[in-house]
Image (cartoon, helix red, strand yellow):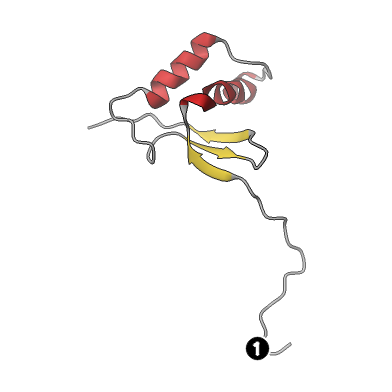
Amino acid sequence: MSLLEPPTAVHTRPSRKGTVRPMTGADVPEVARLFLKVFRGADRPADQELQHYLCTLALASPSHDEMLGTQIYEQQDGRIRSALLAVPMRF
């Protein structure tokens, strides 16, 4: 191997083909279920009260900005694997 040749990877990970994007109202049920799974240890659909709370908290604020608000990681198959919940506020 010379210094001009690009290095070759011995072990490469498969590329992750999901995307990070802003959360929408349609994502709320799945994000709420993920919340229950992570923070409550319950893998079940969330009730309407939790869904409404997360929607209000993350999407209904007058300070809501799609690019600065809650972001989700969506796999290529459409499943949401993670969410970064952000509460928009003005100071």
User: Could you tell me which secondary element the residue under label 1 belongs to?
Assistant: loop
The amino acid on which the numbered mark 1 sits, given as a three-letter code, is Leu
Q: Position of residue 76 (x, y in %)?
A: 65, 42
**Residue located at (52% from left, 23% from top):** 28
Point out the residue furthest to the right here.
10
Q: Position of residue 7 (x, y in %)?
A: 68, 77
Report the residue at 72% width, 57% height from top: 13
Q: Quadrant of residue 15?
A: bottom right
**Count of marks placed on residues:** 1
Give the image quarter of residue 53.
Answer: top left
Question: Quick check: 67 left or right of 19?
Answer: left
Residue in the picture at 29% in, 30% down: 63
Measured as percent of width and height from the top left, residue 23 is found at: 48, 32
Please state if 56 lies on the left or on the right of 72 as rendered. left
Observer-nearest residue: 35 or 40?
35
As drawn, the residue found furthest toward the left would be 91
Using residue 8 as the reference point, say whether residue 29 is left or right of it: left
Q: Foreground residue, 77 or 49? A: 77
Image quadrant where one finds the C terminus? top left
Where does label 1 land, which residue? 3
Q: Is residue 57 above or below residue 72?
A: above
Residue at the image position 76 percent from the left and 64 percent from the top: 11
